[in-house]
């Protein structure tokens, strides 16, 4: 059976609705930056998701071609993730989606290296004529965080976030947003297939000790 990150790393992908403190290690990703309302049909967010999946599946299916990666094993492409911020705003102001800046993310197996990602980007261009040159290989280290599972529409996330922040304060921590530590979401549900009230999203915020 293909390796499934969601099943093997339940701590990261299957948290409780009850907030918890967790330390997130460094992980490899492909990412693509952009800005604007993610709901725009032809917006930068939609483009970023298309580019990431095209690159990710090219890497996954490399086993059927001539490109070889040391240590390759078959795997399920992990769920889509996103880092979000709004300039001049700490946290998230959900009513101002037009101000959003994002980095869309897909986690990679450790055997994928930057040169493999560059190969996949070229392969997508060659085979599909699809320009994914804005996709980057990156290592994300989040460190100490508070996280919780949100069930429901994205616009109802503030209720979950409030609970997370109350919990971390009660444990002696404070929020620690910075240029490299942002509001993080992991999308466990496909909004095209799951009704809004049942969508599952992991929400993660960076913290520090007081």
Image (spheres, helix red, strand yellow):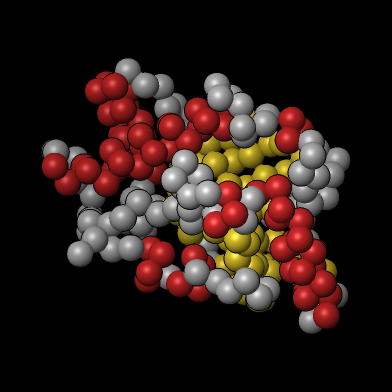
Residue at image point 56% right, 25% down? 41
Q: Quadrant of the C terminus?
A: bottom right
Which residue is at a point 38% across and 69% down the rendered structure image? Answer: 7
Q: Which residue does the image show at 13% across and 38% down from the upper left?
A: 66
Residue 21: horizontal and vertical position, in percent?
A: 66, 76
Q: Residue at x 52, y 62 (%)?
A: 26
In the image, 116 versus 171, the foreground residue is 171
Residue 60 can be seen, yes or no: yes
Would you identify the image quadrant in which residue 200 lies?
bottom right
Left or right position of 183 against 103: right
**Residue 74 spot, x, y in % from top left:** 22, 56
Q: On the rendered structure, is 177 left or right of 103?
A: right
Could one spot residue 34 in this view of the protein? Answer: no
- Figure disc tally: 0
* Residue 203 x %, y %: 64, 60
Quick one: which residue is furthest to the bottom in this view? 171
Seen in the picture, residue 151 relative to 115 is either above or below; the reply is: below
Please identify the quarter of the rendering in which residue 88 is found: top right
Q: Nearer the viewer, residue 99 or 116?
A: 99
Q: Position of residue 140 (x, y in %)?
A: 55, 55
Q: Say if 147 sits above or below 60 in the image.
A: below
For the N terminus, the image quarter is bottom left
Q: Nearer the viewer, residue 136 or 199?
A: 199
């Amino acid at each position: 059976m293909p390796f499934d990150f969601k099943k093997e790393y339940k701590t990261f992908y299957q948290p409780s609705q009850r907030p918890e403190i967790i330390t997130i290690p460094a992980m490899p990703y492909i990412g693509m930056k952009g800005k604007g309302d993610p709901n725009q049909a032809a917006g930068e967010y939609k483009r970023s998701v298309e580019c990431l999946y095209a690159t990710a599946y090219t890497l996954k299916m490399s086993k059927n071609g001539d490109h070889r990666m040391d240590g390759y094993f078959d795997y399920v492409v992990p769920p889509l993730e996103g880092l979000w911020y709004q300039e001049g705003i700490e946290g998230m102001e959900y009513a101002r989606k037009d101000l959003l800046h994002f980095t869309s993310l897909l986690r990679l197996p450790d055997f994928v290296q930057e040169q493999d990602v560059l190969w996949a980007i070229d392969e997508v261009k060659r085979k599909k004529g699809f320009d994914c040159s804005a996709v980057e290989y990156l290592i994300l280290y989040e460190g100490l965080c508070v996280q919780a599972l949100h069930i429901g529409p994205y616009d109802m996330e503030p209720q979950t976030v409030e609970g997370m922040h109350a919990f971390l304060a009660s444990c002696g921590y404070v929020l620690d947003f910075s240029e490299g530590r942002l509001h993080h979401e992991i999308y466990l549900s496909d909004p095209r297939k799951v009704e809004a009230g049942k969508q599952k999203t992991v929400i993660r915020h960076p913290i520090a000790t007081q």
